Image (cartoon, helix red, strand yellow):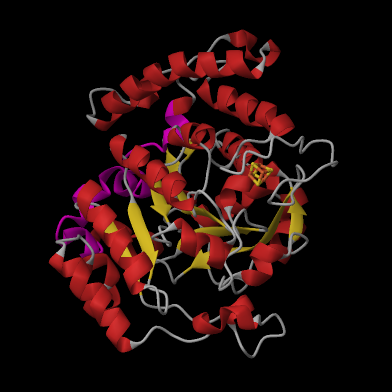
Amino acid sequence: MGRDFGSLWIWKEGNVRDRLGWYYSVATNSMPAKYLICKRVPVDPSIYNMDIDSLWKEYDTALERFIRLWSDVRSRSITIRDLPIAKVNLLDLLLAIVKGSLHACNFCRWQCKVDRTTGGKLGACKLEAESRVSTFFHHMGEEIVFRGIKGSGTIFFTSCNMRCAFCQNGDISTDRFNGSVVTPYMIALMAYKLRLEGCHNINWVGGEPTIHLHNIVEAIHEMSRFIINKVRYEDELFVIKSINADMPYRYSMSSSNAYYGDEFNVPQLWNSNFFMSREALNVLRCIMDVWLPDLKFGSNKCSLRLARTPWYWETVTSNIKQVHCWDEDMVIRHLIMPGHVKCCTKPVLEWVADNMPEVLINIMDQYRPENYCDPYSPNYDPAYKDMARFPSKQEIDEAYRYAKELGLNFEMITFEKHFLR
Ligand code: SF4
């Protein structure tokens, strides 16, 4: 891999490595990703004949086994190499759950309960069952713990379940026909390509990944079956190449980047607005190795006006709290918005200080007026005139001063570019 991700300076600073220990171990292939552990958790073979309620009951039992096994793997008292792959396993069960749920979609807080398999009535995300990917590439703009040396393997899905007026990916999030239709196998191959080329994780993002949960779970199911040097690749290569935004031939592929034993291994990163349902979160719990929630608005008044999203605060904070309660690896992101330090930044920072002051938080100053807030765009809506500017230096300073006063764990991850060595 040339320069080594595992010996990057950030892992020796402060408590970053402690906070992201599981992710670090999977990224460096000294531990298997959670999806490989799922394969060792047997479930009732009759799951394919169960209704959704029975599938969730089976999940409760399987989850206990998964947590015990994950804990043993983490403490190194057991290695999955010594365990057989269960014929019908937790990964199969998760796939059955998301496929079953698609008939009355409950992936996010909108709880539309529309049947996305029939193409009739659409929910708030405006999606049927198929997924589109706008692009995928080695993302060198993410936090250093994720971009590392060779980048974060980012897959951008189309559409969103929120409507942020200032969205920086407005072309992807507001145009549901953006990008190319992909199958779960193609998505798995994108992950395969990125990881073999040295990416340190698979970064599920959009738009919003939650609304593609069924296809993402199936893609992970597919990649869990990739055996070293035996991946069928050629047929889909043309489609995949047309979506890939990396410079051709920039990265060479090596299986030494990507395997735990002879199984394909890569940490899964959930880069999301966290406006998901508890059901979706429970599915993701078994397969995500690290979480990157976006905690943007400090009140529902702001989320309604700027993102046309009700129930924002209670939904997103409760999901983040749940992930923290599960003792998972996480980095929270908060974007400083112009004119929203008092109503959004401060309540967000206070909430983190009250609930999880030790968690890494990236307080971002890169807001720029985009989408409906960009006065030079044909999409510009004067109703968002107040958002058509960059945050001022005073606002940014105030946000950082307040975070410091609250004792938050933000400086290393927020200012890492200044510390580059
Ligand atoms: S993903 Fe969310 S917005 Fe889309 S149909 Fe399902 S519940 Fe509705």
Is residue 182 or residue 82 the one in the foreground?
182
Task: Measuring from the top left, give residue 151's x and y in whole percent.
Answer: 44, 65
Residue at image coords 27%, 74%: 399
Q: Is 96 above or below relative to 311?
A: above
Q: Is residue 417 at least partly visible in the picture?
A: yes
Residue at image coords 53%, 32%: 279
Horizontal arrangement in the rendering, residue 167 relative to residue 402 (left or right): right
Is residue 24 or residue 64 the one in the foreground?
64
Task: Measuring from the top left, give residue 9's x and y in whole percent.
Answer: 21, 66
Q: Is 183 above or below relative to 340?
A: above
Task: Measuring from the top left, give residue 417's x and y in whole percent.
Answer: 29, 77
Residue 391 lies in quadrant: bottom left
Horizontal arrangement in the rendering, residue 62 relative to residue 10 (left or right): right
Where does ligand 1 appear, by image quarter? top right
Instruction: Considering the whole magenta stretch, tell me its main secondary structure.
Output: helix
Q: Is residue 86 at least partly visible in the picture?
A: no
Is residue 216 or residue 160 the one in the foreground?
160
Residue at image coords 48%, 37%: 281
Residue at image coords 31%, 61%: 347
Residue 47 lies in quadrant: top right
| Membership of 10 in magenta stretch | yes
Q: Is 291 above or below relative to 278?
A: below
Residue 299 lies in quadrant: bottom left
Task: Measuring from the top left, give residue 184's x and y in whole percent.
Answer: 68, 43
Residue range of the region highlighted in magenta in the rendering: 8-37
